[in-house]
Image: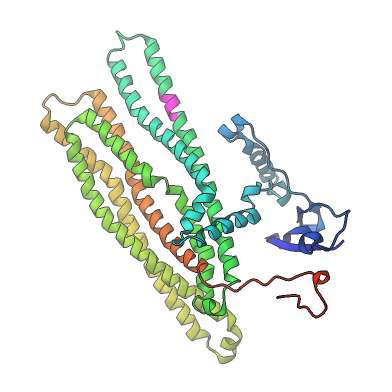
């Protein structure tokens, strides 16, 4: 029967092509064509060697399987067995994506939210994306809060264990067992909540990446001639390949925007309970480090913008070179064109090099800040309090100072991720707001009067 065949994905394996096509009823394309025995629309995979199979259904995990991610065991075990046999996973081994993760549904959802934004006086692509991922981000934030609470419970339990060991002769043995069990439970909740928080944020990042890539592609084929002249092919390719990927990677540290300052505040408060006023001297040392890091962040943001501009120029030049390769060969312009490409690449690499140097300085300050804070804090405490340090307070303070290292490392990453997200969103929103051609509706022949055009 009549139908529409649309290729939606292709991939290579061992020199052979794999095509994934979507088969739809002809009645979905032209409503006047009817065929009662036509099957319902479904996604099929056309694999190599002409074998046609349906996608493997995604497993439906139970509560415990969701908690401990055991629903992944089957595919991990299959991959291990195939690896021992010198093989790999085949296309038919992979599960079908859930409906909300499939590209078609993802594109429709984002386009609907973006149309709602176009009706607003002040448009925001971030708000449209938030409507798609708010559930994942909010639940991930809940798991992040559990992780923070469990991580700070460990130093407090450690203090009680040290106090118990100092007085173990007068304390019952059951107290020690309970404290040890509580320490293990705290570590368990830290690992479990961190895994779930990370998994949900990565899922949100994949949704954003897929939606933006699809939106940029569809917009690029609908641009008017005037709007197309304002943007190069290289810039549009960078939006799909680089900016969308950067948005996905930024989700790994996006929670640190709020969780890192919270952890820093809680750690300083608990540290004050252990070493008193010496905490403020350590805080002063941290503030000095933050001022230096702020200057480093500004430099990183500036170098990142320069690198992206240089990348756009390089991709544009490469695209023009490939389009005019015949003329370049006929005219013997290989050497000057090669020099021009090398010059643009050298400019981009220079920015990448300085970015690497600047980030190394940032990491050095972050890693050294914990040692500096510990040194200043304990030196001040020894000068202020003549009674010396209590072992329980010392070990607890050391554990808390160790916890300070993580938010100090996360804050620069979070600021850097936020800056990258902001730059990428501005670039993508600028494209999506560009003028586009009016869509023309093609009507079925049976619905046309004699002499009436198909496209109006």
Compared with 64, 449 (above or below) is: below
Closer-to-camera residue (312/346): 312
Give the colour scheme shown.
rainbow
| Image: 203 above or below 381 | below
Q: Nearer the viewer, residue 170 or 211?
A: 211
Q: Which residue appears at 77% of the width and 58% of the height?
A: 23
Q: x, y percentage for residue 104?
A: 65, 56
- Toward which corner of the image does residue 266 lie, by quadrant? top left
**How far across and how far down the image is residue 255, in percent?**
42, 45
Q: Is residue 16 visible?
A: no
Q: Is residue 72 above or below residue 427?
A: above
Is residue 99 found inside the magenta-colored segment of the image? no
Using the image as rendered, state which of residue 423 and residue 347 is in the foreground: 423
Q: Is residue 211 visible?
A: yes
Q: Which residue is located at x 56 percent, y 61 percent?
A: 213
The mark tally for this picture is: 0
- On the image, the x and y values in percent for residue 152 come to 35, 31
**Magenta segment main secondary structure:** helix
Q: Quadrant of the C terminus?
A: bottom right
Residue plotted at (28% across, 18% down): 163
Query: What residue occupies the far bottom of the structure in this picture?
Result: 331
Instruction: Please say if 41 is above or below 71.
Output: below
For the point 24% across and 54% down, which residue is it? 292
Q: Residue 1 falls in which quadrant of the image?
A: bottom right
179 left or right of 170?
right
Left or right of 404: which side holds 106? right
Magenta highlight range: 183-187
Image x and y of residue 376, in percent:
18, 39
* Furthest residue in direction front, as rendered: 449
């Amino acid at each position: 029967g009549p139908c529409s065949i649309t290729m939606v994905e292709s991939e290579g394996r061992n020199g052979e092509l794999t095509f994934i096509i979507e088969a739809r009823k002809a009645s979905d394309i032209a409503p006047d064509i009817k065929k009662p025995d036509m099957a319902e629309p479904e996604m099929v995979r056309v694999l190599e060697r002409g074998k046609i199979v349906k996608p493997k259904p995604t497993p439906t995990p139970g509560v415990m399987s969701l908690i401990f991610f055991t629903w992944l065991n089957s595919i991990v075990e299959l991959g291990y067995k195939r690896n021992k046999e010198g093989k790999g996973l085949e296309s038919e081994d992979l599960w079908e994506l859930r409906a909300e993760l499939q590209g078609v549904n993802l594109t429709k959802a984002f386009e609907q939210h973006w149309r709602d934004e176009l009706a607003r006086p002040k448009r925001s692509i971030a708000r449209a994306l938030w409507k798609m991922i708010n559930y994942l981000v909010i639940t991930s934030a809940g798991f992040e809060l559990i992780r923070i609470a469990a991580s700070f419970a460990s130093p407090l339990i450690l203090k009680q264990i040290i106090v118990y060991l100092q007085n173990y002769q007068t304390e019952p043995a059951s107290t020690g067992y309970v404290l040890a069990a509580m320490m293990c439970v705290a570590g368990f909740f830290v690992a479990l909540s961190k895994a779930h928080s990370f998994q949900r944020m990565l899922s949100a990042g994949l949704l954003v990446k897929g939606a933006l890539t699809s939106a940029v592609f569809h917009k690029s084929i609908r641009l008017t001639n005037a709007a197309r002249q304002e943007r190069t092919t290289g810039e549009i390719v960078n939006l799909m390949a680089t900016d969308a990927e950067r948005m996905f990677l930024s989700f790994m540290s996006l929670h640190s925007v709020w969780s890192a300052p919270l952890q820093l505040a809680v750690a300083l408060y608990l540290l004050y309970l252990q070493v008193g006023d010496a905490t403020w001297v350590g805080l002063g040392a941290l503030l000095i480090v933050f001022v230096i890091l702020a200057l480093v962040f500004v430099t990183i943001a500036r170098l990142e913008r320069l690198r992206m501009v240089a990348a756009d120029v390089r991709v544009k030049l490469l695209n023009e070179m490939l389009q005019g390769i015949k003329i370049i060969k006929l005219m013997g312009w290989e050497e000057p064109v090669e020099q021009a490409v090398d010059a643009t690449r050298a400019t981009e690499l220079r920015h990448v090099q300085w970015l690497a140097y600047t980030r190394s300085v940032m990491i050095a300050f972050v890693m050294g800040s914990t040692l500096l804070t510990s040194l200043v804090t304990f030196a001040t405490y020894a000068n202020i309090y003549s009674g010396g340090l209590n072992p329980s307070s010392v070990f607890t303070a050391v554990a808390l100072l160790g916890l300070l290292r993580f938010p100090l490392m996360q804050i620069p990453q979070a600021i850097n991720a936020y800056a990258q997200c902001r730059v990428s969103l501005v670039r993508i929103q600028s494209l999506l707001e560009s003028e586009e051609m009016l869509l023309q509706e093609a009507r079925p022949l049976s619905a046309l009067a004699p002499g009436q055009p198909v496209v109006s």
